[in-house]
Amino acid sequence: VVSERRQLGLGQFGAYAEARVFFAPTDWTVGWALSFERSLTDWLAATVDVAVERSEVDVRNGRAEIDLASGSFALLGQAETRRLAVRGGAGARVGTARIQGVPDAGSGLAGDRVTGVWGGPLVELRVDFPKRSTTSLSLRAEVGWALASVRGLENGQLAVGVDDLWSAVSVGLSIRL
């Protein structure tokens, strides 16, 4: 019996435009992500990414600026055809968040800043549409739960938060090395 095994290669590098929303009172954050994926077997891959995102949210007495920087690791099951590659699995994301309060001009109020660590488990699904032997259009979706969170208060009440359930979507280009 002869077994044919595809060559796994060095991995796949991707660059993405990304949007994330937390189901605490926060608007969509938008930004960029870079990822690297390596096939471990024909059916299993490991992926890491780094993402930088920003948002501005209107609050009662001004606005809140939210800056996020995070990284993730996930193990993904994978299946491929010539026209489509599907990967899905679980992992974790951890990062830092900075929330800066910016009061309305002339309000006489002072804005404050809070910085902290956020993160938690995630589930990821990725679909790649190969354009050539080495490049693919990639779509990613992620859902996670922030077990560690960062919250911004206004007058003692929650105004914005990197908190609770999150979802993210991204589109980008991947290059197979």
Image (tube, rainbow, N blue to C red):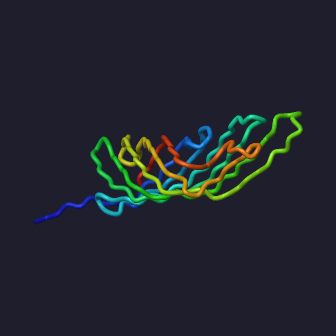
Judge by depth and name the residue closer to the eye, 160 or 125. Answer: 160
Q: Which residue lies furthest to the left in this view?
A: 1
Q: Which residue lies furthest to the bottom in this view?
A: 1
Judge by depth and name the residue closer to the eye, 114 or 19. Answer: 114
Residue 95 quadrant:
bottom right
> Is 133 on the left-hand or right-hand side of 152?
left
Question: Could you tell me which residue is drawn at 43 percent across and 43 percent down?
Answer: 138
Whole-percent x and y of residue 73? 48, 59
> Is 51 on the left-hand or right-hand side of 48?
right
Whole-percent x and y of residue 119? 56, 57
Whole-percent x and y of residue 6? 27, 58
Tell me the quadrant of the picture where the C terminus can be found.
bottom left
> Is 162 on the left-hand or right-hand side of 137?
right
Whole-percent x and y of residue 175? 44, 49
Relative to 139, is 7 above or below?
Answer: below
Question: Could you tell me which residue is drawn at 71 percent across and 44 percent down?
Answer: 157
Residue 117 quadrant:
bottom right
Relative to 160, is 78 above or below?
Answer: below
Tally of numbered tags: 0
Question: Could you tell me which residue is drawn at 47 percent across and 44 percent down?
Answer: 173
Judge by depth and name the residue closer to the eye, 47 or 153. Answer: 153
Q: Which residue lies furthest to the front in this view?
A: 156
Tell me the quadrant of the picture where the N terminus can be found.
bottom left
